[in-house]
Image (spheres, helix red, strand yellow):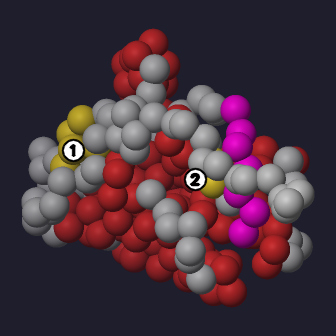
Protein backbone atom coordinates (compact mmCIF):
# COMPACT_ATOMS: atom_id res chain seq x y z
CA UNK A 1 0.00 0.00 0.00
CA UNK A 2 1.38 3.41 -1.01
CA UNK A 3 2.24 5.84 1.76
CA UNK A 4 1.82 8.85 -0.54
CA UNK A 5 -1.03 11.12 0.43
CA UNK A 6 -3.46 12.23 -2.22
CA UNK A 7 -3.12 15.94 -2.91
CA UNK A 8 -6.54 17.42 -3.46
CA UNK A 9 -7.49 20.85 -4.73
CA UNK A 10 -8.99 23.04 -1.98
CA UNK A 11 -12.60 24.06 -2.47
CA UNK A 12 -12.46 27.77 -3.31
CA UNK A 13 -14.92 30.24 -4.79
CA UNK A 14 -15.17 30.35 -8.58
CA UNK A 15 -13.03 32.89 -10.50
CA UNK A 16 -14.91 36.16 -10.80
CA UNK A 17 -16.73 35.82 -7.47
CA UNK A 18 -15.13 39.09 -6.38
CA UNK A 19 -14.36 40.45 -2.92
CA UNK A 20 -16.49 40.39 0.23
CA UNK A 21 -19.03 43.22 -0.04
CA UNK A 22 -17.63 45.42 2.76
CA UNK A 23 -14.08 45.14 1.44
CA UNK A 24 -15.23 45.90 -2.12
CA UNK A 25 -17.23 48.93 -0.97
CA UNK A 26 -14.31 50.40 0.98
CA UNK A 27 -12.01 49.85 -2.01
CA UNK A 28 -14.43 51.34 -4.56
CA UNK A 29 -15.78 54.32 -2.62
CA UNK A 30 -12.87 55.27 -0.33
CA UNK A 31 -9.51 53.81 -1.36
CA UNK A 32 -9.82 54.07 -5.16
CA UNK A 33 -11.07 57.70 -5.22
CA UNK A 34 -8.26 58.69 -2.82
CA UNK A 35 -5.70 56.91 -4.98
CA UNK A 36 -6.99 58.57 -8.17
CA UNK A 37 -6.94 62.00 -6.54
CA UNK A 38 -3.41 61.73 -5.12
CA UNK A 39 -1.55 60.00 -7.97
CA UNK A 40 -0.23 61.60 -11.15
CA UNK A 41 1.24 59.83 -14.19
CA UNK A 42 4.86 59.99 -13.03
CA UNK A 43 4.00 58.63 -9.59
CA UNK A 44 1.91 55.83 -11.13
CA UNK A 45 4.76 54.80 -13.43
CA UNK A 46 7.34 54.99 -10.63
CA UNK A 47 5.17 52.90 -8.31
CA UNK A 48 4.69 50.25 -11.00
CA UNK A 49 8.44 50.16 -11.69
CA UNK A 50 9.25 49.82 -7.98
CA UNK A 51 6.76 46.99 -7.47
CA UNK A 52 8.12 45.11 -10.49
CA UNK A 53 11.71 45.57 -9.29
CA UNK A 54 10.88 44.34 -5.79
CA UNK A 55 9.01 41.32 -7.12
CA UNK A 56 11.93 40.36 -9.39
CA UNK A 57 14.33 40.71 -6.44
CA UNK A 58 12.43 38.32 -4.18
CA UNK A 59 11.63 35.70 -6.84
CA UNK A 60 15.03 35.78 -8.56
CA UNK A 61 16.65 33.55 -5.93
CA UNK A 62 13.99 30.82 -6.09
CA UNK A 63 14.68 27.46 -7.70
CA UNK A 64 12.40 26.20 -10.47
CA UNK A 65 11.01 23.72 -7.95
CA UNK A 66 10.07 26.45 -5.48
CA UNK A 67 8.69 28.67 -8.24
CA UNK A 68 6.28 25.89 -9.16
CA UNK A 69 5.12 24.81 -5.67
CA UNK A 70 1.50 25.73 -5.03
CA UNK A 71 0.58 26.84 -1.53
CA UNK A 72 -2.81 27.56 0.02
CA UNK A 73 -2.63 30.95 1.71
CA UNK A 74 -5.09 32.98 3.80
CA UNK A 75 -7.18 35.42 1.74
CA UNK A 76 -5.40 38.75 1.57
CA UNK A 77 -7.11 42.11 1.20
CA UNK A 78 -7.83 42.65 -2.49
CA UNK A 79 -7.36 38.99 -3.40
CA UNK A 80 -10.17 36.77 -4.65
CA UNK A 81 -10.75 33.50 -2.86
CA UNK A 82 -10.12 31.62 -6.13
CA UNK A 83 -6.53 32.98 -6.20
CA UNK A 84 -5.44 31.55 -2.84
CA UNK A 85 -3.92 28.29 -4.16
CA UNK A 86 -1.24 29.48 -6.57
CA UNK A 87 2.49 29.05 -6.95
CA UNK A 88 4.89 31.98 -7.28
CA UNK A 89 5.13 31.18 -11.01
CA UNK A 90 1.33 31.21 -11.37
CA UNK A 91 1.20 34.59 -9.62
CA UNK A 92 3.84 35.94 -12.01
CA UNK A 93 1.90 34.58 -14.98
CA UNK A 94 -1.23 36.33 -13.73
CA UNK A 95 0.73 39.59 -13.46
CA UNK A 96 1.99 39.13 -17.04
CA UNK A 97 -1.54 38.51 -18.36
CA UNK A 98 -3.02 41.47 -16.47
CA UNK A 99 -0.09 43.80 -17.19
CA UNK A 100 -0.30 43.13 -20.94
CA UNK A 101 -4.08 43.57 -20.88
CA UNK A 102 -3.90 46.83 -18.91
CA UNK A 103 -1.24 48.19 -21.26
CA UNK A 104 -3.43 47.48 -24.27
CA UNK A 105 -6.48 49.09 -22.62
CA UNK A 106 -4.47 52.20 -21.68
CA UNK A 107 -3.02 52.56 -25.19
CA UNK A 108 -6.40 52.08 -26.86
CA UNK A 109 -8.19 54.57 -24.60
CA UNK A 110 -5.32 57.06 -25.05
CA UNK A 111 -5.81 56.76 -28.83
CA UNK A 112 -9.56 57.33 -28.70
CA UNK A 113 -10.40 53.65 -29.22
CA UNK A 114 -12.95 51.84 -27.09
CA UNK A 115 -11.53 48.36 -26.28
CA UNK A 116 -13.86 45.77 -27.85
CA UNK A 117 -13.43 43.01 -25.27
CA UNK A 118 -14.82 43.22 -21.74
CA UNK A 119 -12.39 42.67 -18.86
CA UNK A 120 -13.33 39.51 -16.96
CA UNK A 121 -11.57 38.20 -13.85
CA UNK A 122 -11.95 34.59 -15.00
CA UNK A 123 -9.95 35.38 -18.18
CA UNK A 124 -6.78 36.39 -16.30
CA UNK A 125 -6.28 33.34 -14.11
CA UNK A 126 -2.97 31.48 -14.56
CA UNK A 127 -2.37 27.96 -15.81
CA UNK A 128 -0.66 25.58 -13.36
CA UNK A 129 1.18 23.91 -16.28
CA UNK A 130 2.94 27.12 -17.38
CA UNK A 131 6.53 27.36 -18.64
CA UNK A 132 8.54 27.83 -15.42
CA UNK A 133 11.83 28.42 -17.22
CA UNK A 134 10.67 31.60 -18.96
CA UNK A 135 8.30 33.13 -16.43
CA UNK A 136 10.84 35.54 -14.89
CA UNK A 137 11.88 36.77 -18.33
CA UNK A 138 8.21 37.12 -19.36
CA UNK A 139 7.46 39.18 -16.25
CA UNK A 140 10.48 41.43 -16.77
CA UNK A 141 9.60 41.97 -20.44
CA UNK A 142 5.97 42.76 -19.57
CA UNK A 143 7.09 45.34 -17.00
CA UNK A 144 9.54 47.02 -19.37
CA UNK A 145 7.03 47.16 -22.22
CA UNK A 146 4.28 48.44 -19.92
CA UNK A 147 6.46 51.27 -18.60
CA UNK A 148 7.88 52.26 -21.99
CA UNK A 149 4.60 52.31 -23.91
CA UNK A 150 2.34 53.83 -21.26
CA UNK A 151 4.92 56.52 -20.50
CA UNK A 152 4.73 57.58 -24.15
CA UNK A 153 0.90 57.53 -24.24
CA UNK A 154 -1.19 60.69 -23.85
CA UNK A 155 -3.39 59.35 -21.07
CA UNK A 156 -5.26 62.67 -20.75
CA UNK A 157 -6.30 62.83 -24.43
CA UNK A 158 -9.75 61.26 -24.05
CA UNK A 159 -10.77 61.52 -20.37
CA UNK A 160 -14.43 60.70 -21.09
CA UNK A 161 -13.60 57.46 -22.91
CA UNK A 162 -13.75 54.57 -20.46
CA UNK A 163 -13.54 50.80 -20.21
CA UNK A 164 -15.07 48.88 -17.33
CA UNK A 165 -13.01 47.18 -14.65
CA UNK A 166 -14.85 44.05 -13.44
CA UNK A 167 -14.95 45.25 -9.81
CA UNK A 168 -14.72 49.04 -10.00
CA UNK A 169 -16.64 49.98 -13.11
CA UNK A 170 -15.67 52.40 -15.90
CA UNK A 171 -12.11 53.78 -15.81
CA UNK A 172 -10.36 56.06 -18.29
CA UNK A 173 -6.74 55.67 -19.47
CA UNK A 174 -5.31 57.68 -16.59
CA UNK A 175 -7.32 55.73 -14.03
CA UNK A 176 -6.30 52.36 -15.51
CA UNK A 177 -2.64 53.44 -15.32
CA UNK A 178 -2.96 54.52 -11.69
CA UNK A 179 -4.64 51.22 -10.81
CA UNK A 180 -1.76 49.14 -12.25
CA UNK A 181 0.72 49.53 -9.36
CA UNK A 182 -1.76 48.68 -6.57
CA UNK A 183 -2.63 45.51 -8.48
CA UNK A 184 1.08 44.61 -8.57
CA UNK A 185 1.32 45.36 -4.84
CA UNK A 186 -1.49 42.94 -3.92
CA UNK A 187 0.27 40.11 -5.74
CA UNK A 188 3.69 41.17 -4.42
CA UNK A 189 2.25 40.49 -0.95
CA UNK A 190 0.78 37.21 -2.20
CA UNK A 191 4.21 36.10 -3.46
CA UNK A 192 5.77 36.92 -0.08
CA UNK A 193 3.15 34.85 1.74
CA UNK A 194 3.62 31.90 -0.65
CA UNK A 195 7.41 32.04 -0.17
CA UNK A 196 6.94 32.03 3.61
CA UNK A 197 5.14 28.69 3.21
CA UNK A 198 7.70 26.97 0.99
Residue at image x 85%, y 76%?
Answer: 63
Viewed as shown, does residue 97 lie left or right of 133? Answer: left
- Establish if 194 lies above or below 65: above
Look at mark 1 in the image and give the residue it sits on: 164
Q: Which residues are magenta?
A: 68-74
Circle number at residue 90: none
Residue at image x 47%, y 52%?
Answer: 180
The image position of residue 151, as x and y in percent, is: 43, 69
Query: Which image quarter is the N terminus in?
Result: bottom right
Query: Which image quarter is the C terminus in?
Result: bottom right
Q: Is residue 34 visible?
A: no
Q: Secondary structure at mark 1?
A: strand
Q: Secondary structure at mark 2?
A: helix
Could you tell me how far apart the alpha carbons at marks 1 and 2 are, in whole angstroms?
A: 19 Å
Residues under numbered marks 1 and 2 in contact, where contact means CB atoms less than 8 Å apart: no
Look at mark 2 in the image and give the residue it sits on: 184
Callout count: 2
- Establish if 110 lies above or below 137: above
The image position of residue 12, as x and y in percent, is: 52, 36
Between 15 and 152, the one lying in front of the other is: 15
Amino acid sequence: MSSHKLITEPKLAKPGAGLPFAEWAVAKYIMLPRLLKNTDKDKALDSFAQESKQILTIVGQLSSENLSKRRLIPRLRGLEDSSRYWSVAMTLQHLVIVGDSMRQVILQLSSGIKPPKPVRTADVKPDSSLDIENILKDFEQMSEQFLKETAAADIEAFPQLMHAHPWFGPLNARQWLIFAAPHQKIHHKQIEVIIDRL
